[in-house]
Image: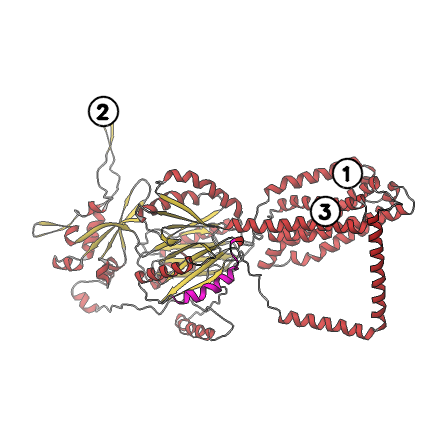
């Protein structure tokens, strides 16, 4: 008795079993996540710390170094990269693929706690971390803008309402608020007026720190009632600070308005963002590693209508970039290809077998094997992506082979005069082991892919497993359902249709033509052998000369840009140059929406750089690919003086923990910092001379101008002045120093001390 015998003799049980497997696959299909590619995100955690006004050297020495020393002890860290810019440090920890991201997050938090004793005591807030790959493209990019309200009020709603609510959604790793204009009270003190009254900026800062407080005041518990004590200890508007008494001179009070002014402004005036040429606040949303892109974006979109009631109607929320549109389009294309391939395979089977039931019986194996594979994919946590669907498309040609082999062997016995049931029992017994060996040999081909390590192994493992599942399921179907159907429906027909006779003559002609050509090849054996050798030689040559790369370049409809200006460029000048870039990009016919933001801070961005996202029109509305759009924009952007925009088409796969200006990144390391600073520019200049390279850039920012003060410590000590006091006064004047805080029901805000911007130069 063969493996197929019980299934042939029990047609109802076999049919019910196959129907059950079919229903399981159909039920699993809606629950499969949709993604562009299998989940290959490296477990990555970004740690950020802010220290407003601190130089990059100070950030690196006092903030980054203590944290890095603790992070270096965490097991499973494959790469650690840090960036320190003015007032901001970001450390990227990339873990091995096998490392659990949640466990890694716990280790990172423990390391931050361990380093807290070595961090500056006046750090405004402790370092924070989030799970994300900073080199990823955002899955959703929103913008908030108003034509009537000040930008600080728009930012207030963006940060306190929209950003916080969206950050709580499952699958969202980070909501980056770009172009922040967080409300603040800016106290501008005139150094000349202070000097005339014998005061310093430190006197103003000390007074402001005591002016607004929000401390507990207790309660009064009377005989019958209890009273909570409340007073007006807080000042929350700039107008209230105008009358704040800083000190007394000549028996009279010196108020803020006497030595300067207090205005309502932004916490950091050196940040700006645009959407489609208008100033606004950007919300750049990144997904967590391993999160379902489609589900995450859908949850965000469902939340947006609820948030509209929380901000004024004069504030408009725009969706500028939605990655799911191109992901859905790509997956839809592959699904159409899969369906088309199934239809074509069935037609080819019919073309050669030329009878209805002989075509239907093996064709049933195709949808049954593919749909049952969905259940296996769901159990393994796989997704419907380009690679898994491609595996199913390829499997269409494999899954029908076993059924055809089984059918042909059974039909051979029917043609010999046996009854269908007897022919099915005998034919299945003869060919059963062959089908098992065929299926296992096909699966064995993919075993090396299953054991590949690194990002390539992770990328193709889902492909190999999906294809193997389909082949194994098709083998089961061919050993069970196919012989059972043959025993019930297959018949030997003595009379054939006209179509059958025409195709038979065509096949006979093909066989005769093959016989004649084979005879010629055997007659001229030397020539045939030389042709074979020439074919092998050409194949080797083409392998050598064909372009090679890590992964094919994609066009997902998004271009990422990073602009660089001179390292000593002022914020106002960078602002105007970015506006010139905006004007060039927005006038391109292929661009649907455009966003950009400037200012030092998030993502390691420096004051002389900006970041941009160019969302292209759908394929049906543009004729150029993303790379062609980049080539078209290059000469136009080259005409903008004093700034250079580096463009690259966003990809679904990016290796590395941070976003670079160009497609490839080369890292120089040296334990001697001075030697590194000396050789890095030389390597850069040498790479620029290579004709095969373009857009060679560096993230080393060492050429900016500085104003260096040399403290005469002897004279300073003579007047009782400590270096700390000098640093504090310089920080008060030029660091946009956060002096104190005031609180509302929504958030906390800062009082900023500075000299008037017109006096900074």
Q: Residue 104: image x %, image y %?
A: 49, 52
Give the CA separation, mark 1 to mark 3: 17 Å
Quadrant of res 701: bottom left
Q: Can you say whether 574 is above or below 526 in the image?
A: above
- For disc 2, the neighbor class at 10 Å (few under 14, some 14 to 19, many from 20) is few
Horizontal side, residue 396 vs residue 154: left or right: right
Residue 520: x and y in percent read 84, 70
Q: Residues within 10 Å of mark 3 (few under 14, many from 20)?
A: many
In the rendered image, which residue does mark 1 sit on?
Answer: 14
Span colored in magenta: 621-639
Using the image, tell me which numbered label, if any, was put on residue 574: none
For disc 3, the marked residue is 366
Residue at 68% across / 56% down in the picture?
446
Residue contact at pointers 3 and 2, CB within 8 angstroms? no
Which residue, as the protein is rendered here, is positioned at the far top?
224
Residue under the point 72% across and 53% down: 397
Residue at x 75% of width, y 48% of height: 475
Q: Can residue 72 be seen in this view?
A: no
Q: In this view, does 737 lie above or below 315?
A: below
Query: Could you give the CA–CA distance between mark 3 and mark 2, rounded to whole angstroms?
Result: 85 Å
Give whichever of discs 1 and 2 has the lower sequence position.
1
User: Mark 1 or mark 3: which comes first in sequence?
Assistant: 1
Left or right: where 676 falls relative to 460: left
Q: Name the residue under label 2.
A: 223
Dot placed on the residue nearer the N-terminal end, 3 or 2: 2
For label 1, the SS is helix
Disc 2 element:
loop
* In this rendering, position of residue 68 left or right of residue 474: left
């Amino acid at each position: 008795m063969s493996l197929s015998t019980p299934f042939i003799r029990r047609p109802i049980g076999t049919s019910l079993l196959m129907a059950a497997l079919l229903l399981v696959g159909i039920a699993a299909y809606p629950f499969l996540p949709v993604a562009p590619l299998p989940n290959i995100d490296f477990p990555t955690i970004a740690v950020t710390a802010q220290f407003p006004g601190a130089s990059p050297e100070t950030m690196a020495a006092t903030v980054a170094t203590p944290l890095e020393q603790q992070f270096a002890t965490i097991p499973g860290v494959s790469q650690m990269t840090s960036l320190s810019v003015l007032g901001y440090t970001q450390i990227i920890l990339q873990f091995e693929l096998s490392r659990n991201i949640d466990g890694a997050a716990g280790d990172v938090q423990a390391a931050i706690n361990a380093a807290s004793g070595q961090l500056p005591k006046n750090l405004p807030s402790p370092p924070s971390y989030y799970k994300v790959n900073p080199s990823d493209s955002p899955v959703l990019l929103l913008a908030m803008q108003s034509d009537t309200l000040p930008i600080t009020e728009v930012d207030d709603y963006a940060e306190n309402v929209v950003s916080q609510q969206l950050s709580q959604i499952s699958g969202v790793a980070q909501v980056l608020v770009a172009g922040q204009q967080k409300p603040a009270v800016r106290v501008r003190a005139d150094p000349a007026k202070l000097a005339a009254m014998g005061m310093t900026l430190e006197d103003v800062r000390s007074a402001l720190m005591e002016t607004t407080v929000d401390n507990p005041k207790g309660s009064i518990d009377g005989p019958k009632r209890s009273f909570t004590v409340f007073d007006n200890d807080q000042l929350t508007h700039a107008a209230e600070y105008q009358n704040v008494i800083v000190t007394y001179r000549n028996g009279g009070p010196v108020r803020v308005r006497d030595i300067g002014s207090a205005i309502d402004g932004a916490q950091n005036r050196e940040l700006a963002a645009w959407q489609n040429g208008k100033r606004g606040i950007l919300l750049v949303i990144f997904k967590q590693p391993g999160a379902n892109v489609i589900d995450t974006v859908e949850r965000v979109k469902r939340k947006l209508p609820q948030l509209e009631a929380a901000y004024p109607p004069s504030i408009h929320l725009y969706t500028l970039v939605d990655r799911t549109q191109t992901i859905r389009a790509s997956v839809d294309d592959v699904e159409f290809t899969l369906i088309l391939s199934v239809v074509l395979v069935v037609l080819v089977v019919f073309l050669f077998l030329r009878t209805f039931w002989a075509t239907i019986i093996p064709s049933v194996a195709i949808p049954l094997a593919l749909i049952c594979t969905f259940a296996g994919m769901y159990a393994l946590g796989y997704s419907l992506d380009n690679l898994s669907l491609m595996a199913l498309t390829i499997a269409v040609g494999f899954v029908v082979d076993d059924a055809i082999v089984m059918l042909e062997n059974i039909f051979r016995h029917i043609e010999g005069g046996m009854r269908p049931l007897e022919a099915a029992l005998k034919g299945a017994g003869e060919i059963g082991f062959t089908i098992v060996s065929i299926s296992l040999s096909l699966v064995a081909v993919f075993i090396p892919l299953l054991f590949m390590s690194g990002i390539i192994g992770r990328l193709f493992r889902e492909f190999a497993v999906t294809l193997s599942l389909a082949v194994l399921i098709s083998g089961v179907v061919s050993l069970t359902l196919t012989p059972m159907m043959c025993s019930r429906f297959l018949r030997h027909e003595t009379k054939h249709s006209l179509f059958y006779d025409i195709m038979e003559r065509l096949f006979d002609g093909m066989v005769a033509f093959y016989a004649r050509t084979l005879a010629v090849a055997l007659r001229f054996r030397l020539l045939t052998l030389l042709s074979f050798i020439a074919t092998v030689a050409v194949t080797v040559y083409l392998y050598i000369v064909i372009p090679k790369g890590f992964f094919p370049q994609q066009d997902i409809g998004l271009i990422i840009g990073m602009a660089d200006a001179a390292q000593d460029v002022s914020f106002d000048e960078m602002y105007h140059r970015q506006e010139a870039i905006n004007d060039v990009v927005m006038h391109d016919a292929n661009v649907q929406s455009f966003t950009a933001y400037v200012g030092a801070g998030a993502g390691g961005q420096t004051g002389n750089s900006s970041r941009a996202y160019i969302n292209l029109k759908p394929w049906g509305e543009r004729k150029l690919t993303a790379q062609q759009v980049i080539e078209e924009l290059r000469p136009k952007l080259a005409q903008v003086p004093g700034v250079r925009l580096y463009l690259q088409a966003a990809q679904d796969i990016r290796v590395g923990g941070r976003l670079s200006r160009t497609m490839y990144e080369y890292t120089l390391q040296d334990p001697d910092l001075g030697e590194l600073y000396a050789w890095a520019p030389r390597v850069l200049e040498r790479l620029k001379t290579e004709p095969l390279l373009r857009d060679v850039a560096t993230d080393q920012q060492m050429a900016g101008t500085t104003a260096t003060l040399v403290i005469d410590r002897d004279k300073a000590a003579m007047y009782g002045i400590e270096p700390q006091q000098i640093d504090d006064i310089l920080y008060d004047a030029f660091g946009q120093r956060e002096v104190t805080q005031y609180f509302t029901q929504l958030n906390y805000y800062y009082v900023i001390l500075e000299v008037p911007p017109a006096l900074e130069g």
